[in-house]
Amino acid sequence: QVQLQESGPGLVKPSQTLSLTCTVSGGSITTNYYYWSWIRQSPGKGLEWIGYIAYSGSTYYSPSLQSRASISRDSSNNQFSLQLSSVTPEDTAVYYCARYETGWFDYWGQGTQVTVSS
């Protein structure tokens, strides 16, 4: 059974960088052909996909966030991370990590609330 767990600060000040880590157990993040994603949900809004890091290490981002988002991985610890720079209160959301496999997100973390406020 694959499990994902998000971790990171729950409060970030405006203009700073949001940093979150997803720890994966029960499966390797380098296994073909999985894509490890970050997704968020802002208050009163739907889910917004941020980007992914593939099993190969390649990355791809939502066009609306690609200038501020960066996803990396630590294969030795089976973790992948999100950095989102220059945050504003509009980046306040529940952030999820999830695994994507050919057509759907099959495993999700429980989500972590991040609030951007001074």
Image: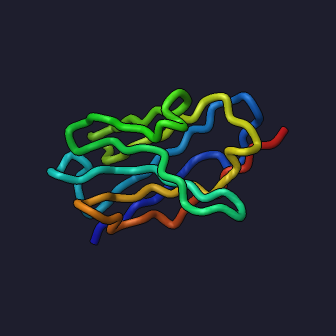
Q: Tell how many labels.
A: 0
The quadrant of the rendering that contains the N terminus is bottom left
Q: Nearer the viewer, residue 115 or 46?
A: 46
- Residue at 31%, 65% (x, y): give it: 104
Q: At which x and y percent is residue 62?
A: 46, 41
Color style of the picture: rainbow
The picture quadrant where one finds residue 77 is top left
Tell me: 44 left or right of 36.
right
**For residue 85, which quarter of the picture?**
top right
Q: Residue at x 35, y 56 (%)?
A: 24
Residue 26 spot, x, y in % from top left: 26, 63
Q: Residue furthest right?
A: 118
Give the quarter of the figure containing the C terminus: top right
Query: What residue is at 72 percent from the left and 40 percent from the top?
Result: 12
Determine the residue located farthest toward the bottom in the rendered image. Answer: 1
Position of residue 45 relative to residue 86, above or below, is below
Which residue lies most toward the front here?
A: 63
Residue at image coords 37%, 46%: 79
- Residue 19 image position (x, y, % from top left): 56, 38
**Measured along the vertical axis of the image, is residue 22 above or below residue 56?**
below
Residue 96 at x, y = what percent? 51, 57
Tell whether 113 sits left or right of 30: right
Q: Is residue 78 above or below residue 72?
A: below
Relative horizontal placement of residue 28, taking residue 113 as reference (left or right):
left
